[in-house]
Image: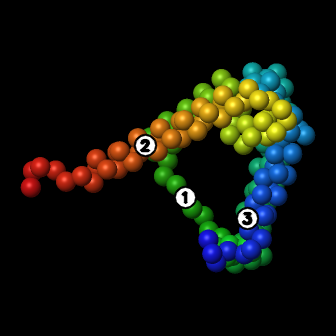
Amino acid sequence: MADRHPLFMPLIFVGGLIFGFGLGFSQMARPEVVLNFLQFEDFGLLFVMFGAAIVSGIAFAVMPRIRDSAPLTGDRYERRLKPFDRNVLIGGGIFGVGWGLSGICPGAAYASLGVGNVTILWALAGMFAGAYLQGVWRSKRAAAETAPTGAD
């Protein structure tokens, strides 16, 4: 972290503020809007997601051709493929069920809190509890896999 540009953290903060403001301004931080989208009643969220995908796709295609590495971190641009396994399916399923029940996803939860939705703290508490429990489960599983067996 010490080799990063001094503006790295302030720019991350500003980027988060802009993202949160955009979610709040576009009403995507309101659970009712998300639930209406999931019930096929309002497709505004679909346009927001398509817009974000287009901008991201262009950035991912163009930036490696312009620069060899990221300007603030110095990390090389490269694809980091993750395995598609049981954990991805289970995690995606849990995320989808939580999104459908609460009408909010992690990024929008903070923006929703910023626009005055205090009851979103319950959803945030659930997200943190789920992340903590997943970390505990994963560390116990890793410890069990590396523990010596009594067969030696």
Which mark is first along the chain, 2 or 3? Answer: 3
Residue depicted at 86% across the width and 45% down the height: 22
In terms of secondary structure, where does tag 3 sit?
Answer: helix
Q: Residues within 10 Å of mark 1 (few under 14, many from 20)?
A: few
Question: What whole-number distance in Å separates the C-alpha atoms at marks 2 and 1?
Answer: 25 Å
Question: What whole-number distance in Å separates the C-alpha atoms at marks 3 and 2?
Answer: 29 Å
Q: Is residue 83 above or below residue 126?
A: below
- The residue that label 3 is drawn on is 9
Q: Is residue 33 above or below residue 18?
A: above
The quarter of the rendered structure image containing the N terminus is bottom right
Q: Residue furthest right?
A: 25
- The residue that label 2 is drawn on is 136
Which mark is first along the chain, 1 or 2? Answer: 1
Which mark is first along the chain, 3 or 1? Answer: 3
1 or 3: mark nearer the eye:
3
In the image, which disc is placed on residue 81? 1
Tell me the kind of residue under disc 1. Leu
Tell me the kind of residue under disc 3. Met
Front-most of residues 2 and 36: 2
